[in-house]
Image: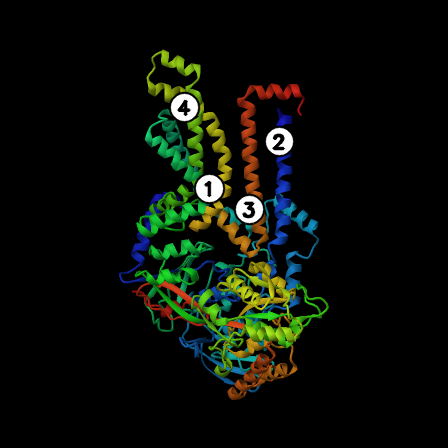
C-alpha cells in the first residue's frame, strides 16, 4: 500500500478512537522486564505465566483465595490409582473461532511434556493423556499423585489445529535457530486476545467478547509495557502514564504511600528466604577453618541462627515488609504448620557459648554467597547478617553477585554459606520439602539442597508424602519432616517475602500470593 | 591513494577482529545463559544437553572462529533471551537509536553553534557568563541524572511530556519512525536533550574558542577595515572558518552519541539497540551482546575511515607528507 505515512498515522489514530467505546477501561501496567515469549509452554517464569493467563487457560485454575476451581474442565475424578478423568467444558471456543475439544486438551498436555517444554516440573509423575470421548480425557500418572490438580493449574491449553498449521507442535526450542510462530502469536481460550506484541516495548490485549466465563472486572484492554529503570517506572506511575507497577522498589514505598494519586497494596508472597550451609564437605571451601567443616556441627548452625536477629532484619532492612519465620515455606502452602513457625529469638550470649563449645571460642571466617538482583533487598540482608555474625566473632566475607552468575555457582555446590528464596507454585509442601530438604538424589530429590543437608528420617517422611493422598496424613508427614529439620537446624530461615504493588488510587485488584496480577478481577476507577 | 585506502581498510578489519575478540572473551564472565534458560528444576543432564546444542561446550577458539565466520555473513545467531535472529532484532531497534542520535546531534549543532557564536562575540555579557557556567553543569552531570531530573520536572511535576517510551510509531518501509506522529515527537524531546546535552556544551565551547581565535586574525581586521557590516564579518567570515573543526568533531561525536545512547535509552525505556544490549547483559544473551559490540565497533571504524579520507582530500599537506615518507 502506498498510503502517505501521515495519512496512515491519522487513519490509525481515528481507528483507535472508534475502537474504544465510551467507558472502556484500559489497564496499563509495567514491571522491570518483558516476557520472553507468548508460547505457554516455553518459559516457566512468574511474569510470563501471568501474561499467559490472559490468553491461555488451564484445565483447573486458582480462585481469589488460591483454591482450585474448574476452568476448562468442569469436573474430575480418579479413574483408578494411576489416572484422573476430566470432563471438559462445552461450548468453549479459541480466539480463532474453533471449538476447544478433547483432542486439543490431549495435545496440549503432550506438548507440555515435550523435552523442549519448560513446564515438565508441573507434569512430574504424569505419563501422558488420552482421549476418552469428545468431552472427556484421562491423565495417566505413574502412581497416585496427590498434587496433580495443583500442577495442572500451570499447564495451559492450546489448539491442536492451530499449532499444526503454524508448525508449533513443540514448545519454542533454542536449538532450532528460528523463532517459532507461537512466540509472538497466540490463540487461546482465555478472557483476553493478544492484539499486538512488540518485544521489550509494548504488548496489547483486548477483552475477548465471546469468552465463556464472566469478566468480574471492567478492563477491556490490557497494555503491558516493561520499564527497566526503577525511577522511570515510578515516574510513569506518578505522571499517570501507567496505572499499575508490579515491582515498586522497596525504598520508595513509604514515599508512594504519601502520594494521594497512588495507592500501595501489600500482599504476602508465597516465597521464603533462607540461608543454607555446606554440610557435606570435610573442609569448607571458603573459610579460615582448615581440616574440618564447622557447619557439620549442629551447635555451630544453631549459633548462627541465634546470632541472626530476624525481627531486626524485618524492621531495619525490610522496612516491615517481611514475615520472620522458622520454617521453609509460606503459610499459603498446604502442609504449613503454625505451631512450628515460631521465629527463633536472637541470643548472642548463647550463640557465643555454642561456638566456644564447638571449638571456635574466637569465631572463624567464612564466605557468604549472595545474589544482588533476585530477592527483595537480597544484598542488604546479607550485609546485615554479616554484621550480626560479626558480633559473635564470626567474620563473614560477603560475595554478592548478579543472578546470572550466582545460580550457576551455587548449583555446582560451589559455596560454603548461601542465600536462597524458594517459592512454591504448586502450593503444596512436597515441592519445597523434596527440593530443599531431601538428600540429593534422582529426579527432583534435593535438587536445590545445595548444602547437601541429609537426614534419613526426613527423607523417609518426604518419600511417604510423595504418594500419600489422605490430607490429614499428608499434613502429619510434612509436620514430621519440618520438625526434624528444625531440630537439626538444617537451614537458617529468615522470612516470607511481602510484595508491595503500587497503583493508581481507586483501582481494585486482588493481590495473589503468586505475585500475579489477574486482569479479569481488576476494577479501574 | 589506493594503497592508503587498502591500508586503512585492513586496519579497520584488525580493529574489528580485536573488538570481536575482546567482546567474546568478556562474555565468559557474564554468567551462564543455560541457568536462565532452563527451569531451576532441570537436571544436570538437561543442562549439559542444552550446553551442547548451543555449542557452549566447545573450546573457546572454536566458538570464536565460528562466530567470526558467521558474523562476516551478517549472521549473529539467535538471541537466547528472545529466541529471534539477532540481525532481525538489531535491524528492528536500529531506527529508534538512529533517530534519537540524529535528533540529539542536530539539537547539539543547532543550539550549540549559536550559543558558541554568542559567547564568543559577547565575551563579557552576563548571559555569556551564565551560559558558560551552565555548560559546566552539562559537562559534569552524569547523563542518567540529567534524564531523571528532566523526567521529574517535565513528566511528573508538569505532566507535559511522556516519561518513557517512543510514543506511537509509523512504519515507512522497514523503518519504524516516531517523527511523523505527535506522540512520537513529544517522546523524542526529553531523551534527545539528555543525550545531546554533553555534545551541545562541547560544541558551544569549541565554537567559542574558535571564534575568539579567528576574530584575532588579520583577515578579520582587514574585513573590518573594508567597512563590512558586523553581520557579514561574524557569520560570513569568522563563523565559516570555525566550522571545519566543528564538523570534524561532530562527525566523530556521532559515533559516541550512538554508543552512549545506552544510558539514555535505559533511563527513558527507549526501545533502541542500547536498551537491547543492557537487557542482553543481564540475561547473559551472548549473541546479542557480541553483535551489538561489533556493530558499534563497525560504526566507529567507518566514521574514522570517512574522516581520514576526508582529511586526505581536504588537506593537501597530508598527501605530500605521505608521498615523501614512503607510506610509513
Work out whether disc 3 and disc 4 sit on a shared chain: yes
Asked if badge 1 and badge 4 are on a common chain, one would say yes
**In the image, residue A48 above or below residue B241:** below
Q: Mark 2 points at which residue?
A: B8
How far apart in space, not on screen, are marks 1 and 4 (Cα)? 28 Å
Query: How many C-alpha atoms fall within 10 Å of the one at disc 4: few (<14), some, or many (≥20)?
Result: many
Q: Do the residues labelled 3 and 2 touch (CB within 8 Å)?
A: no
Residues A167 and A516: in front is: A516
Task: Confirm whether circles 3 and 2 share one chain.
Answer: yes
Q: Which residue, given by chain and number where applicable, does mark 1 sit on?
A: B98
Residue A281, image x, y percentages: 69, 70
Depth-wise, is mark 3 or mark 4 nearer the camera? 4
What's the residue at 53%, 22% (across, down)? B314
Tell which residue pokes out farthest to the top in this image. Answer: B226
Answer whether labels 1 and 3 touch (C-beta < 8 Å): no
The chain to which mark 1 is attached is B
Q: Which of B152 and A106 is in front in this view?
A: B152
Q: What SS does tag 1 mark?
A: helix
Where is residue A117 shown, x and y percent of the image? 57, 67
Amino acid at each position: 500500500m502506498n498510503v502517505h505515512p501521515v495519512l496512515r498515522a491519522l487513519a490509525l489514530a481515528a481507528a483507535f478512537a472508534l475502537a474504544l467505546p465510551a467507558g472502556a477501561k484500559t489497564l496499563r501496567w509495567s514491571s522491570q522486564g518483558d516476557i520472553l515469549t507468548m508460547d505457554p509452554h516455553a518459559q516457566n517464569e512468574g511474569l510470563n505465566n501471568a501474561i499467559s493467563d490472559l490468553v491461555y487457560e488451564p484445565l483447573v485454575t486458582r480462585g481469589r483465595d488460591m483454591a482450585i476451581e474448574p476452568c476448562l474442565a468442569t469436573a474430575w475424578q480418579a479413574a483408578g490409582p494411576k489416572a484422573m478423568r476430566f470432563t471438559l467444558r462445552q461450548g468453549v471456543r479459541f480466539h480463532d473461532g474453533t471449538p476447544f475439544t478433547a483432542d486439543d486438551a490431549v495435545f496440549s498436555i503432550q506438548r507440555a511434556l515435550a523435552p523442549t517444554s519448560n513446564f515438565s516440573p508441573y507434569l512430574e509423575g504424569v505419563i501422558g493423556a488420552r482421549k476418552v470421548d469428545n468431552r472427556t480425557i484421562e491423565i495417566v500418572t505413574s502412581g497416585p499423585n496427590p498434587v496433580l490438580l495443583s500442577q495442572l493449574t500451570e499447564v495451559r491449553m492450546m489448539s491442536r489445529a492451530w499449532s499444526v498449521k503454524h508448525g508449533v507442535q513443540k514448545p519454542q526450542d533454542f536449538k532450532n535457530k528460528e523463532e517459532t510462530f507461537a512466540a509472538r502469536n497466540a490463540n487461546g481460550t482465555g478472557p483476553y486476545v493478544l492484539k499486538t506484541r512488540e518485544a521489550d516495548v509494548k504488548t496489547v490485549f483486548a477483552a475477548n467478547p465471546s469468552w465463556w466465563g464472566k469478566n468480574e472486572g471492567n478492563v477491556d484492554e490490557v497494555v503491558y509495557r516493561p520499564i527497566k529503570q526503577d525511577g522511570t517506572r515510578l515516574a510513569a506511575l506518578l505522571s499517570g502514564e501507567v496505572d499499575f507497577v508490579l515491582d515498586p522498589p522497596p525504598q520508595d514505598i513509604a514515599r508512594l504511600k504519601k502520594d494521594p494519586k497512588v495507592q500501595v497494596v501489600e500482599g504476602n508472597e508465597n516465597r521464603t528466604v533462607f540461608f543454607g550451609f555446606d554440610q557435606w564437605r570435610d573442609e569448607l571451601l571458603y573459610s579460615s577453618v582448615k581440616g574440618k567443616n564447622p557447619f557439620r556441627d549442629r551447635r555451630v548452625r544453631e549459633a548462627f541462627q541465634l546470632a541472626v536477629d530476624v525481627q531486626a532484619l524485618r524492621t531495619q532492612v525490610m522496612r516491615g515488609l517481611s514475615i520472620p519465620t522458622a520454617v521453609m515455606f509460606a503459610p499459603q502452602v498446604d502442609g504449613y504448620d503454625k505451631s512450628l513457625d515460631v521465629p527463633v529469638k536472637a541470643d548472642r550470649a548463647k550463640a557465643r557459648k555454642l561456638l566456644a563449645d564447638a571449638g571456635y571460642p574466637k569465631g572463624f571466617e567464612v564466605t557468604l554467597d549472595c545474589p544482588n538482583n533476585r530477592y527483595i533487598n537480597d544484598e542488604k540482608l546479607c550485609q546485615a547478617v554479616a554484621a550480626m555474625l560479626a558480633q559473635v566473632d564470626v567474620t563473614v566475607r560477603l560475595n554478592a553477585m548478579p543472578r546470572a552468575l550466582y545460580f550457576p555457582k551455587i548449583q555446582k555446590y560451589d559455596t560454603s554459606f548461601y542465600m536462597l528464596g524458594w517459592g512454591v507454585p504448586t502450593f503444596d509442601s512436597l515441592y519445597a520439602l523434596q527440593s530443599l530438604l531431601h538428600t540429593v538424589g534422582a529426579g527432583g530429590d534435593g535438587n536445590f539442597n545445595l548444602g547437601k543437608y541429609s537426614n534419613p528420617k526426613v527423607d523417609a517422611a518426604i518419600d511417604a508424602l510423595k504418594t500419600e493422598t489422605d490430607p490429614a496424613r499428608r499434613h502429619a508427614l510434612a509436620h514430621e519432616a519440618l520438625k526434624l529439620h528444625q531440630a537439626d537446624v538444617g537451614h537458617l530461615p529468615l522470612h516470607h517475602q511481602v510484595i508491595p504493588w503500587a497503583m493508581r488510587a481507586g483501582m481494585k485488584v486482588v493481590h495473589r500470593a503468586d505475585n500475579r496480577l489477574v486482569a479479569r478481577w481488576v476494577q479501574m476507577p | 591513494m589506493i594503497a592508503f585506502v587498502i591500508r586503512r581498510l585492513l586496519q579497520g578489519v584488525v580493529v574489528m577482529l580485536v573488538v570481536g575478540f575482546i567482546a567474546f572473551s568478556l562474555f565468559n564472565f557474564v554468567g551462564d545463559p543455560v541457568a536462565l534458560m532452563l527451569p531451576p528444576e532441570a537436571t544436570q543432564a538437561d543442562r549439559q544437553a542444552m550446553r551442547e546444542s548451543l555449542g557452549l561446550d566447545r573450546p573457546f577458539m572454536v566458538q570464536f572462529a565460528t562466530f567470526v565466520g558467521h558474523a562476516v555473513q551478517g549472521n549473529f545467531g539467535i538471541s537466547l533471551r528472545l529466541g529471534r535472529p539477532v540481525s532481525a532484532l538489531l535491524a528492528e531497534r536500529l531506527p529508534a537509536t538512529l533517530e534519537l542520535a540524529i535528533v540529539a546531534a542536530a539539537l547539539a549543532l543547532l543550539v550549540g553553534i549559536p550559543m558558541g557564536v554568542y559567547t564568543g562575540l559577547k565575551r563579557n555579557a552576563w548571559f555569556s557568563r551564565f551560559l558558560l557556567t551552565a555548560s559546566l553543569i552539562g559537562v559534569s552531570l552524569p547523563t542518567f541524572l540529567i534524564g531523571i531530573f528532566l523526567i521529574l520536572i517535565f513528566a511528573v511535576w508538569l505532566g507535559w511530556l511522556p516519561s518513557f517510551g517512543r510514543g506511537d510509531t509509523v512504519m515507512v518501509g522497514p523503518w519504524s519512525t516516531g517523527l511523523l506522529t505527535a506522540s512520537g515527537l513529544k517522546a523524542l524531546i526529553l531523551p534527545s536533550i539528555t543525550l545531546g546535552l554533553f555534545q551541545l556544551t562541547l560544541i558551544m565551547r569549541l565554537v567559542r574558542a574558535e571564534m575568539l581565535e579567528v576574530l584575532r586574525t588579520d583577515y578579520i581586521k582587514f574585513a573590518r577595515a573594508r567597512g563590512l557590516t558586523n553581520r557579514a564579518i561574524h557569520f560570513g567570515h569568522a563563523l565559516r572558518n570555525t566550522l571545519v573543526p566543528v564538523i570534524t568533531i561532530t562527525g566523530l561525536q556521532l559515533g559516541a552519541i550512538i554508543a552512549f545512547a545506552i544510558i539514555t535509552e535505559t533511563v527513558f525505556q527507549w526501545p533502541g539497540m542500547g536498551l537491547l544490549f543492557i537487557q542482553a547483559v543481564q540475561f547473559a544473551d551472548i549473541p546479542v551482546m557480541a553483535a551489538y559490540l561489533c556493530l558499534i565497533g563497525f560504526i566507529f571504524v567507518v566514521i574514522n575511515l570517512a574522516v581520514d579520507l576526508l582529511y586526505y582530500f581536504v588537506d593537501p599537506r597530508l598527501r605530500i607528507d605521505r608521498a615523501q615518507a614512503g607510506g610509513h
